[in-house]
Image (spheres, rainbow, N blue to C red):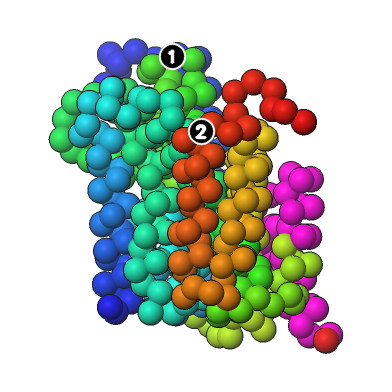
Amino acid sequence: MSAWNIVILASVVCVALKVLGYLIPPRAFEHPTVSRIANLLTVALLAALIAVQTLGAGQSIAVDARVPAVLVAAGLYALRVPFVVVVIVAAAVAAGIRAFT
Amino acid sequence: MSSRPRRTPEETAAFRAGLAVGLATTAYGVSFGALATLSGLDIWQTCFLSLVMFTGGSQFALIGVLASGGIAAGPSAITSAGLLGVRNVFYSIRMSPLIGPGFWRRAAAAQVTIDESVAVAVAQPTPSAQRVGFWVTGILIYLGWNVTTLIGALIGDLLGDVSAYGLDAAAAAAFLGLLWPRLKQRQTQAVAVGAAFVATLLTPFLTPGLPVLVAAVVAIVVGAFNLLGGKEERA
């Protein structure tokens, strides 16, 4: 599977999901359990991605400069600092720690 | 078109809301573009994702899994992006009656159905203001996101090694920014903690990408039984 295959296939899936909602009758997905799971699915995937991106190193766990960077990011989000600023600061914290250790 | 009725105050407010949200969101595109090229995609693949996939969470998920697992993690990357895109089905259903008939109009609406356009739309008091909010936010972000993605991709292409600049931490911080507004209820907080725990625990035992998918089971279990949902939870 090439990078282009991955990019195109994933894009087709995501577009199809958007189109699906405009094709099906509104009643089909109205069940509260279904919409609750869909909402929680987003939360679970994002949280899992944060964990793996922060602690994963291939197929092992590593605690390094990423951990303090993400903690700083969490603090800044709590203070309602804009997204772009937080992302840049997080990169700077990790890069700074790596430069001095 | 001077016979066209003037905009109502509600529509003007929706227009302004769309403008504000649109401009703020557009800036994220730079981080996406930079991280995508640093995850191993080229500039064209990066821009293709913003042009066609156009749903931030899925885009970040795809490049996040590819960054840690490489091309071999392709199936997991596609599945992660797809699962994160499932919420768009519900957004589409919500917007469908508002958009009205017409193939091209509905096709365009589907493409710009994302968190932000739907959020601005549903916050408006009248159907006409909801339509204004949806289209202004969606179109503005579509144009802006693609321009900033290209800028970010060019920057990322110049930067080179990921970890030296702390951009792996930036990716985690970006995911956190997408998650943060969703953590208001006890139930979502519990799912977030549970999923993060499961993904971390499984990382040494599964190929990269899979732990994230298995962690999604936490959402299905908690959602199906509505654990910690409803009224006040037990202490």
Q: Which residue is mark 2?
A: B225
Highlighted magenta segment, given as a residue range: A71-100
Residue at the spot 57% in from the left edge and 62% down from the top edge: B199
Residue type, label 1:
Thr
Name the quadrant of the N terminus of chain B: top left
Residue at the spot 73% in from the left edge and 49% down from the top edge: A77
Query: Does any portion of residue B22 appear in the rendered image?
Result: no
Q: Which residue is mark 1?
A: B126
Chain of the residue on which disc 1 is drawn: B
Residue at the spot 28% in from the left edge and 50% down from the top edge: A15
Crowd class of label 2 (few under 14; some 14 to 19; many from 20; radius 10 Å): few
Give the mark count.
2
Q: Which of A58 and B117 lies nearest the eye of the viewer?
A: A58
Question: What element does badge 1 sit on?
Answer: loop
Q: Which of B155 and B84 lies nearest the eye of the viewer?
A: B84
Q: Farthest left residue? A: B103
What separation in Å lies between label 1 and label 2 (alpha carbons)? 35 Å
Residue B227 higher or lower than B194, as above or below: above
Residue type, label 2:
Phe
Q: Position of residue A42 (x, y in %)?
A: 49, 46
Of pointers 1 and 2, the one earlier in the residue sequence: 1
Q: Position of residue B226 (x, y in %)?
A: 54, 31
Residue A27 higher or lower than B148, as above or below: above
Q: Is residue A88 left or right of residue A23?
A: right
Magenta stretch encompasses residue A93: yes
Q: Is residue B79 left or right of residue A16?
A: right
Crowd class of label 1 (few under 14; some 14 to 19; many from 20; radius 10 Å): some
Q: Which mark is residue B30?
A: none
Q: Is residue B208 left or right of residue B176?
A: left
Residue at the spot 69% in from the left edge and 57% down from the top edge: A85
